[in-house]
Image: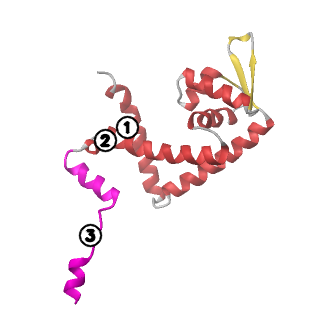
Amino acid sequence: MAANARTTTTPVAPKTTELKAAAATQGSVNRYLAAYIMGVANRLANGASNHYRTHFSLGMSEWRAMMAIGGQDELIVRQVADLADLDYAAASKSVRVLEERGLVTVEQTSRRGRAAVVRATPEGAETYKKLRDAAARRQRRLTSTFTADELATLWALLRRVEQQVPHMNAE
């Protein structure tokens, strides 16, 4: 009877992570570090996007812009773009969305050229704190299996990868 049970058992499909690990050793796209990092980043970004859209009605560009603005007294849109790691057009659009939501004010000024000065409103400052706390909780979940030394090493390695980006993209 035990032998019969073994022959009728439905095989269990390998987990996605097992498939990806096997594929990485067989020459797939995940064998290339940049592609692997992008794949992981895409999955993290999709999860974050779902979280921030569900809980705050903000997309990732707006989240990034709000995180940049909330940590400063005032910024110009170019600075928002730089701090949020967004292109200028995406930063400008995100600032408009945040302004429409009442989270920031935008003031055209002549004292800084034609630049528009962006400031968080009181509601924006509260939203920033909630976003910051949510991001910290998400990061603690992501890094919960790492020791402090491993995290320090991971950050150091990621910074080295980042330093290589201009060299990688030079061709």
Q: Position of residue 102 (x, y in %)?
A: 76, 32
Q: Residue at x 61, y 45 (%)?
A: 52
- Decide if residue 93 is on the left or right side of residue 29: right
The residue carrying mark 1 is 161
Q: Nearer the viewer, residue 13 or 91?
A: 13
Callout 3 secondary element: loop
Q: Secondary structure at mark 1?
A: helix
Question: Predominant secondary structure in magenta?
Answer: helix
Q: Residue furthest bottom?
A: 1
Name the residue that disc number 2 marks. Answer: 33
- Kindly report the distance in space between the C-alpha atoms of the residues bearing marks 2 and 3: 32 Å
Residue type highlighted by circle 1: Val
Residue nearest the observer in this picture, 142 or 56: 56
Magenta residue check for 5: yes
Report which quarter residue 76 is drawn in.
Answer: top right
In this view, the residue in front, 101 or 131, is 101
Which percent across, then down, holds residue 115?
A: 68, 14
Q: Amino acid at mark 2?
A: Leu
Q: Which residues are magenta?
A: 1-27
The residue under label 3 is 11
Q: Nearer the viewer, residue 57 or 118?
A: 57
Q: Can you say which quadrant of the picture contains the N terminus?
A: bottom left
Q: CA distance from mark 1 to mark 2?
A: 10 Å
- Image height of 130 relative to 160, above or below: below
